[in-house]
Image: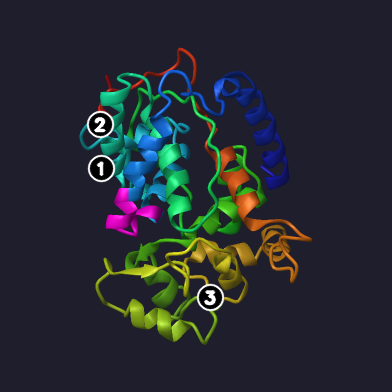
């Protein structure tokens, strides 16, 4: 199917879906039933990130991976054997589960049976961004937890080796746009990746063992030194070269200059639409006389956090995030 047609159809379907269930998400949902909910989550996240600064990126990634499978319903948190969603190939390296459980434990003491695990994941991502010197923003809450978690449902996660057409298609199917694709990919401004995901790009991208030609020649030797051929594929390297622990737009500048670490990030510079989104944030007088990267990132995060949510009488409020009630 033509990508533009798919985008239009996906947006129409998404708007119809969100017009029913999503009306029940709102800011301050727990204002009366558990007014300390957000401060409790924020405190747990703060302690976790202070103890381990890499946790900010981990919690941000957890929210993305939860939302892209069956919607933002906490399904990725479930431990129900080998068939659990969290064991999917596309979820490799996803973590932060213990932080969510810690927050849930405190919430169950204060407000038993009130705050969903799905909302904790969304709030924790927001607080993680703030801890990395990113924007602090309001998160609409009221999600309920899903009752399904199956590894087979996570087979179509966006992948570092996807073409730009595949990436756009996967985002369109969730009601997201090319702009959202760029901004949510820019979440890579914090965090690391394993050399496992770099091997083909560095040593087997083209016949003869050649590297991805889109990599800046000045940056390629450094990448290869961090992930040497036949080296330890579990070694982790920064995704945002030069700014891996601070939330900023450096990731977009790296993509534009050929210094993207991940292949999927680099491909954003190959497509005229996604490249134009990147360029829109590079103006000399941004964000005063142009779009604000931080404001637009927040908009895309809030939008993503509303994918396929369960509200009202749908789903449940788990007592423990790793188990169905």
Residue to which mark 2 is pinned: 105
Q: Is residue 47 above or below residue 6?
A: below
Q: Which percent across, then down, holds residue 259?
A: 53, 75
> Outermost residue toward the left?
81
Residue 256: which quarter of the image?
bottom right
Left or right: residue 304 versus residue 89 is right
Magenta residues span 47-56
Q: Earlier in the sequence, mark 2 or mark 3?
A: 2
Q: Main secondary structure of the magenta part?
A: helix
Instruction: Classify 10 Å Cα crowding around label 1: few (below 14), some (14-19), many (20 and above).
Output: few
- Nearer the observer, 49 or 270: 49
Residue 281 can be seen, yes or no: yes
What is the C-alpha distance between the residues marked 1 and 3?
Answer: 33 Å
Quadrant where the C terminus is found in the figure? top left
Quadrant where the N terminus is found in the figure? top right
Residue 288: which quarter of the image?
bottom right
Question: Do tag 1 and tag 2 residues touch (Cβ < 8 Å)?
Answer: no
- Check residue 259 in the rendering and tell me which mark sits there, or answer none: 3
């Amino acid at each position: 199917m033509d990508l533009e047609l798919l985008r239009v159809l996906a947006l129409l379907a998404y708007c119809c879906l969100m017009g029913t269930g999503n009306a029940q998400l709102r800011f301050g949902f727990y204002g009366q039933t558990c007014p300390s909910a957000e401060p409790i989550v924020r405190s747990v996240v703060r302690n976790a990130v202070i103890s381990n600064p890499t946790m900010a990126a981990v919690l941000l990634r957890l929210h993305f991976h939860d939302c892209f499978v069956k919607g933002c319903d906490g399904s990725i948190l479930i431990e129900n054997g080998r068939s659990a969603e969290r064991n999917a190939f596309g979820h490799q390296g996803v973590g932060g589960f213990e932080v969510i459980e810690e927050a849930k434990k405190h919430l169950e003491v204060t407000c038993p049976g009130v705050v969903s695990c799905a909302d904790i994941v969304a709030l924790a991502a927001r607080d993680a961004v703030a801890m990395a010197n990113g924007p602090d923003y309001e998160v609409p809450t009221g999600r309920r937890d899903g009752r399904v978690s199956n590894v087979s449902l996570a087979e179509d996660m966006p992948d570092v080796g996807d073409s730009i057409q595949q990436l756009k298609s996967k985002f369109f199917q969730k009601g997201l746009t090319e702009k959202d694709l760029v901004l949510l990919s820019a979440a890579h401004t914090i965090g690391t990746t394993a050399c496992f995901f770099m091997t083909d790009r560095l040593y087997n991208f083209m016949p003869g063992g050649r590297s991805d030609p889109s990599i800046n020649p000045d940056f390629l030797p450094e990448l290869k030194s961090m992930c040497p051929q036949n080296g330890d594929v579990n070694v982790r390297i920064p995704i945002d070269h030069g700014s891996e622990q601070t939330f900023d737009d450096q990731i977009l500048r790296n993509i534009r200059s050929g210094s993207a670490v991940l292949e999927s990030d680099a491909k954003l510079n190959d497509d005229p639409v996604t490249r134009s989104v990147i360029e829109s944030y590079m103006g000399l007088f941004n964000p005063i006389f142009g779009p604000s990267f931080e404001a637009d990132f927040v908009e895309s995060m809030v939008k993503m956090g509303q994918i396929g949510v369960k509200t009202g009488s749908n789903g449940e409020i788990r007592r423990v995030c790793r188990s169905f009630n």
